[in-house]
Image (cartoon, helix red, strand yellow):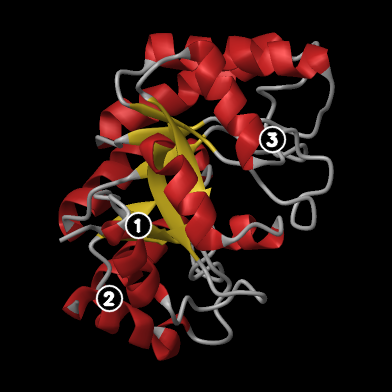
């Protein structure tokens, strides 16, 4: 049975970070994943809440900030490495399986080289999975990593089995790709899947069928729920019950 993580960057945003973890447990999620909230939290208290709930941490982002990361920003290499080191420190403490190295808003060959350097640094410092996520321009204009093929090119260049694709079904659809075709083409590279509805990025009402499709194509990993709830989170969790029952 795959784990299904509540993404604390999107769910229960009106509540303090640590309370979101507690709500995830009560709501029936079997794991959590973070954006960069943990970097601002007291680590000791975070560990206490994780022990209290028993929820594993699937992953967390490097610091996002106003540029949606610094890993591809030319001239910000020291900051990018510091952000990675901080994420590694937290990931090791909480037992997170993966770190998503957020690229930032940049373009061009120099940004490409900067991102490669950041990813090499992350792979050297963390023994778990390093994730890279193509993000649609409609969601984050100017984001460096804007297509699945660009991500695959980076993976081919670095040739490290721990560098994996964060396959976000919303962004894949927003880029104009066919979801099944892309899942099939990139399956060996997929390290994590995030779920959301299309086109509003709301509740992933088709989550169970999407999970079934991905399993049929060979995916055996876990899922993150990164969506914007239309109202009270708990009122829209029919998809979660259906997914857990299949």
Q: Which residue is mark 1?
A: 223
The disc, 1 or 2, on the residue closer to the chain's N-terminal end is 1
Labelled disc at residue 145: 3
Q: CA distance from mark 2 to mark 3?
A: 30 Å
In three-dimensional space, the C-alpha distance between marks 1 and 2, rounded to whole angstroms, equals 11 Å
Badge 3 element? loop
Q: Quadrant of the N terminus?
A: bottom left
SS for dot 2:
helix
- The answer to whether residue 176 is visible is yes
Is residue 8 among what the camera can see? no
User: On screen, 155 above or below 132?
Assistant: above
Label 3 crowding class (10 Å Cα cut-off): few <14, some 14-19, many 20+?
many
Locate residue 70: give its quadrant: top right
Residue drawn at the location 35% of the way across and 87% of the way down: 238
Whether residue 104 sits left or right of residue 97 in the image: it is right
Q: Classify mark 2: residues with Cα within 10 Å, few (<14), some (14-19) or many (20+).
A: many
Label located before the other in sequence (2 or 3): 3
52 is higher (above) or lower (below) than 209: above
Give the camera-side residue of 57 and 182. 182
Residue labelled with disc 2: 243
Query: Label 1 crowding class (10 Å Cα cut-off): few <14, some 14-19, many 20+?
Result: many
Give the side of residue 15 with respect to residue 69, left or right: left
Q: Is residue 242 above or below residue 137?
A: below
Q: Are marks 1 and 2 in contact (CB under 8 Å)?
A: yes
């Amino acid at each position: 049975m795959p784990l299904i993580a509540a993404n604390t960057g999107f769910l229960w945003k009106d509540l303090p970070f640590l309370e979101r973890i507690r709500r995830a447990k009560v709501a029936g999620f079997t794991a959590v994943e973070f954006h960069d909230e943990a970097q601002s939290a007291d680590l000791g208290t975070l560990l206490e809440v994780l022990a209290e709930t028993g929820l594993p941490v699937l992953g967390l982002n490097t610091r996002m900030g106003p540029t949606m990361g610094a890993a591809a920003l030319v001239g910000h290499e020291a900051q990018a490495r510091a952000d990675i080191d901080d994420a590694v420190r937290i990931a090791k403490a909480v037992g997170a399986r993966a770190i998503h190295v957020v690229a930032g808003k940049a373009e061009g060959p120099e940004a490409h080289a900067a991102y490669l350097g950041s990813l090499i640094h992350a792979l050297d410092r963390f023994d778990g999975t390093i994730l890279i996520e193509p993000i649609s321009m409609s969601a984050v204009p100017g984001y460096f990593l804007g297509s699945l093929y660009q991500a695959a090119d980076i993976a081919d260049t670095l040739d490290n089995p721990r560098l994996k694709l964060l396959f976000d079904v919303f962004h894949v659809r927003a880029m104009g790709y066919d979801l099944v075709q892309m899942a099939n083409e990139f399956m060996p590279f997929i390290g994590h899947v995030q779920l959301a509805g299309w086109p509003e990025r709301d509740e992933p009402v088709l989550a169970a069928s999407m999970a079934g499709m991905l399993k049929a194509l060979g995916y055996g990993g876990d899922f993150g729920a990164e969506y914007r709830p239309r109202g009270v989170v708990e009122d829209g969790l029919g998809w979660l019950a259906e997914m857990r029952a299949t």
